[in-house]
Image: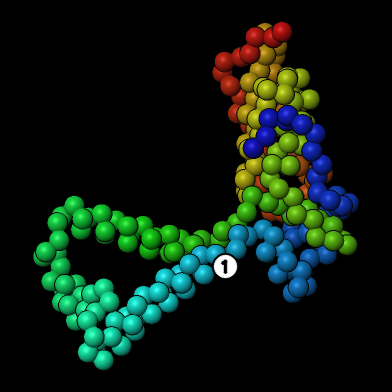
Amino acid sequence: MSQDTQNAGIGSGPHDAGAVPGSAPLGFGAAGMDRILKRETHTSRAVVSVIAAALVMAVCGYALLETAVRAIGQPPWLVDPQTAAERVVALPAGIGPLLLVATGAVIAMAGLFFFLNAVLPGRRARHLLPDRRAAVVVDDEVIAAALARRARLAANVTQQQVMVVVSRNRVMVNVRPTSGVPLRPDAVLEAVRRELQEMGPWPMPEVRIQVATAGVVGA
């Protein structure tokens, strides 16, 4: 998201503006490059995997400890495994409704957290720019800043009157016109589309414009 508050560069190297929009950036395709691009455009699941592995290890380690303590005839460290199993089978007896609901909610939220991290793609707010010699990955905020600047010039408004939100498949241009000054949404939309085509981000998002009904009093 950007309100064109500062100048921003697009990428860290030259890009091929002649690439076909909607197609994969030129120069990509090697297995090693594909892995690098995926790592740069998707969030890592390493932290979640470590947390899940640590929880499983802790539960298994505790179960092994209690089993070993019971095998040598010593009192349980925290709770006897057989007693714990009997309590689980007897649920919800012996536990207050409030505690039972709270425990179930915590377990359900933890399970949902791990499930969503496993099935969702985990894409970062980034796009690829075409280049024949290098991989160029650009934050969506940088693209939004450039498009906001272009929309501001086309609409002849101030920086605070334009806000652009860039997502993976959509660019939303929000414009607040100046009271008494005519605004052509089609011209602004076409200008933003041309700027986006010159950048050539992949995947190519769809551009939409929204003009506020309430205008801004000019200085």
Percent coordinates x, y for residue 91 in the rendering = 15, 68
From the viewer's side, name the closer residue of 56 and 171.
56
In terms of image quadrants, where is residue 101? bottom left
Name of the residue lying farthest toward the front: 74
In terms of image quadrants, where is residue 150? top right
**x 68%, y 30%: residue:** 3
Percent coordinates x, y for residue 165 in the rendering = 63, 38
Q: Amino acid at mark 1?
A: Ala
**x 38%, y 80%: residue:** 61
Density class for disc 1 (Cα within 10 Å; few <14, some 14-19, many ≥20) is few
From the viewer's side, name the closer residue of 64 and 51.
64
Q: Is residue 100 visible?
A: yes
Percent coordinates x, y for residue 103 in the rendering = 26, 59
Q: Is residue 96 above or below residue 213?
A: below
State the scheme by which the image is colored. rainbow
**x 17%, y 77%: residue:** 83
Q: Quadrant of the N terminus?
A: top right
**x 77%, y 37%: residue:** 146
From the viewer's side, name the closer residue of 149 and 124.
124
Percent coordinates x, y for residue 176 in the rendering = 63, 21
Name of the residue lying farthest toward the bottom: 72
Q: Quadrant of the C terminus?
A: top right
Left or right: 41 with respect to 11? left
From the viewer's side, name the closer residue of 199 and 218.
218
Left or right: 209 with respect to 191? left
In terms of image quadrants, where is residue 106? bottom left
Q: Is residue 56 above or below residue 137?
A: below
Count of picture labels:
1
Secondary structure of residue under mark 1? helix
Q: Check disc 1 and report the residue beneath it.
A: 46
Q: Is residue 206 visible?
A: no
